[in-house]
Image (cartoon, rainbow, N blue to C red):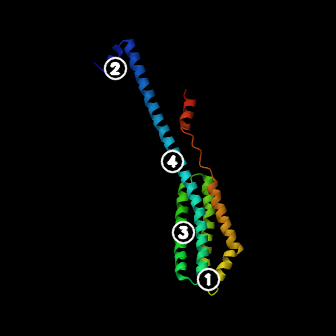
Amino acid sequence: MSLKQSFYKMNLRSKLLIGFTLIFLFALTIAGMGASNVIKLEDKLQNMYEKDLIGVGISRSLTRTVNQIARNVNRYILATGFSDPDSRKEALHEIEELEKGFFDNTQKLKATIIRPEGKALVDAMEPLAKEYIAEVSEIEKLANSAGGAQAAYKFTMSKDYQDTVKELTASIREISKQKPMPLKKASISRSIQRIMP
């Protein structure tokens, strides 16, 4: 006897039971897949929130790095003026390490900021950062030139240098002022519950 014939020979109650069981299993499968997708979506949302928080934290550390570079530039100029080769060497080494860390953190920042407005701010900050680092290199050259510490000090007091530092720190501050994306736990689940009673 074939499966089709045995189905026809069943009583109505058995047919209804099989039919409703199949519908229930189909609905259960769809609900399970939906719940699984909701959980994955919420995990991605949590990941985006964490990345956003990390990006804001990195931007705040960039401000500290700019200040540390400026302090070490002043130290380098003073050491040049007082003919202290050990302090000069130490300050120069510190500047190089800070510059490397600054550019590493800038790359990390680009990877963690996910919102378009944040990415635009990071893109606008990058040329200012390169200009600032180029000016720091210029100060180092001036300190080693015939004018020495006095020429380097004049450069640090120039309007162009001061404006670059001001614009760079303001640009970084704008990035760090951004509030992380609000994370509402199970917000996706709630919106699905409103759709499906």
Nearer to us: label 3 or label 2: 3
Precedes in sequence: disc 4 or disc 2: 2
Q: Which mark is residue 47?
A: 4
User: Viewer-proximal residue, 51 or 7?
Assistant: 51
Q: Residue at x 58, y 70 (%)?
A: 69
Q: Residues within 10 Å of mark 1 (few under 14, many from 20)?
A: some
Q: Residues within 10 Å of mark 2 (few under 14, many from 20)?
A: few
Q: Residue 71's x, y, as percent?
A: 60, 71
Element assignment for label 4: helix
The amino acid beneath tag 3 is Leu
Q: Residue 64's x, y, as percent?
A: 59, 63
Element assignment for label 3: helix
Q: Which mark is residue 81?
A: 1
**Residue denoted by label 2:** 4
Q: Residues within 10 Å of mark 4 (few under 14, many from 20)?
A: few
Q: Which mark is residue 98?
A: 3
* Viewport quadrant of the C terminus: top right
User: Viewer-proximal residue, 117 or 65?
Assistant: 65
Q: Residue 172's x, y, as percent?
A: 63, 60
